[in-house]
């Protein structure tokens, strides 16, 4: 009798192993199965394509042509970096100096808007990326945030990054006032590496979705629950650097009820990975590539 039970157990065990083996082989070989499994475990909401500094792989970062291209490519949002000039005007530039992306030199915070407006923010791109160079890029200006809002209005969605916040400069309320003046509360999200700046913004205007940016210089297999709980008190999601995270990390953040939008995902292989991990979106310099990745994965999943 015991022998019969043992044989039965072997029989069942071997078949279970066989099923697992067949499933994992198919799972590894066919992307559409992975997509389907992801959709079953974690139903896909909208996956956002956010043009990092505009479509900055193809045009000078943080300039009008980069935002126009992103709009033409049908990116969901553009990401742009904000600094204040000496005279307190929010301008769109990534670095705290103008050295890398213009023909000038100096700190943005030490220059007036009038000085900033003289600079050529496009020629560096033509020299650095001749394959994407265009004559029209030479001489493009650093835009003010107001010029961007005035030009694109509700045609675009925006993720504004607060750079170098200082308590005495009130960049948060200057940005919030502009958002309200241009009636863009439904079109704007804010992110920053500065938790104190985000908390300040949340107090000013709790209706604007906020994302906590994070930089890990190590592989972050997991993230502490207490950190996520704290972020949830002021933000709707986090933006970690892609290279340091994993599927487990993404699942943990989403389980905590926060969105996860990693940066900066520029290669197709990583875009595929991010999509299959179930991220809520990615920041990319090549929005057309990620839109194609989303499309291809969905087509493959159509079975
Ligand atoms: O999209 C997140 C990212 O913008 C933060 O890094 O240096 O590109 O502004 P950075
Ligand atoms: Ca940024």
Image (spheres, rainbow, N blue to C red):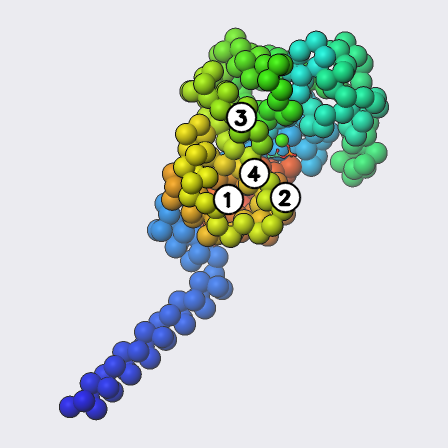
Q: Which residue is mark 1?
A: 294
Number of the front mark, 4 or 2? 4
User: Residue 119's spot in the image, x, y percent?
Assistant: 80, 18
User: Residue 61's spot in the image, x, y percent?
Assistant: 70, 29
Q: Is residue 9 visible?
A: yes
Give the Cα distance between marks 1 and 2. 14 Å
Q: Which residue is mark 2?
A: 266
Q: Residues within 10 Å of mark 3 (few under 14, many from 20)?
A: few
Q: Residue at x 56, y 38 (%)?
A: 214
Q: Residues within 10 Å of mark 1 (few under 14, many from 20)?
A: some
Horizontally, is 195 left or right of 40 in the view? right
User: Residue 274's spot in the image, x, y percent?
Assistant: 52, 47
Vertical position of residue 174 compared to residue 210: above or below: above
User: Residue 27's spot in the image, x, y percent?
Assistant: 44, 62
Give the Cα distance between marks 3 and 4. 13 Å
Q: Nearer the N terminus, badge 3 or badge 4?
A: 3
Give the Cα distance between marks 4 and 2. 18 Å
Q: Which residue is mark 3?
A: 196
Q: Residue at x 84, y 34 (%)?
A: 127
Horizontally, is 138 left or right of 278 in the view? right
Q: Secondary structure at mark 4?
A: strand
Number of the front mark, 1 or 2? 2
Q: Quadrant of the C terminus?
A: bottom left
Q: Nearer the N terminus, badge 1 or badge 3?
A: 3
Labelled disc at residue 214? 4
Figure quadrant of residue 125: top right
Q: Nearer the N terminus, badge 4 or badge 2?
A: 4
Vertical position of residue 282 compared to residue 116: above or below: below
Q: Nearer the N terminus, badge 1 or badge 2?
A: 2
Q: Residues within 10 Å of mark 2 (few under 14, many from 20)?
A: some
- The answer to whether the residues at label 3 and label 4 have Cβ atoms under 8 Å apart is no
Q: Residues within 10 Å of mark 4 (few under 14, many from 20)?
A: some
């Amino acid at each position: 009798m015991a022998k019969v039970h043992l044989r039965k157990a072997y029989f069942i065990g071997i078949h279970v192993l066989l099923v697992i083996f067949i499933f994992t082989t198919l799972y590894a070989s066919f992307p559409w199965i992975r997509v389907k499994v992801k959709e079953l475990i974690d139903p896909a909401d909208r996956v956002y394509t956010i043009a990092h500094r505009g479509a900055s792989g193809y045009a000078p970062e943080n300039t009008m042509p980069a935002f126009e291209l992103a709009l033409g490519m049908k990116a969901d949002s553009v990401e742009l970096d904000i600094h204040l000039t000496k005279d307190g005007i929010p301008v769109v530039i990534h670095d705290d100096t103008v050295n890398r992306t213009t023909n000038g030199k100096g700190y943005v915070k030490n220059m007036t808007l009038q000085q900033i407006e003289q600079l050529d923010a496009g020629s560096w791109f033509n020299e650095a990326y001749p394959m994407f160079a265009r004559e029209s890029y030479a001489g493009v200006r650093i835009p003010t945030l107001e010029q961007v809002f005035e030009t694109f209005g509700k045609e675009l969605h925006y993720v504004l990054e607060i750079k170098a916040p200082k308590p005495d400069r009130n960049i948060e309320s200057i940005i919030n006032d502009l958002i309200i003046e241009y009636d863009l509360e439904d079109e704007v999200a804010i992110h920053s590496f500065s938790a104190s700046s985000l908390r300040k913004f949340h107090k000013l205007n709790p209706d604007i979705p906020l994302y906590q940016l994070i930089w890990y210089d190590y592989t972050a297999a997991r993230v502490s629950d207490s950190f996520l709980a704290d972020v949830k008190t002021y933000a709707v999601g986090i933006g970690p650097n892609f290279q340091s995270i994993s599927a487990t990390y993404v699942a943990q953040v989403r389980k905590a009820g926060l969105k996860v939008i990693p940066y900066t995902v520029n290669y197709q292989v990583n875009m595929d990975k991010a999509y299959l991990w179930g991220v809520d979106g990615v920041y990319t310099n090549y929005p057309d590539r990620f839109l194609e990745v989303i499309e291809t994965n969905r087509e493959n999943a159509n079975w």
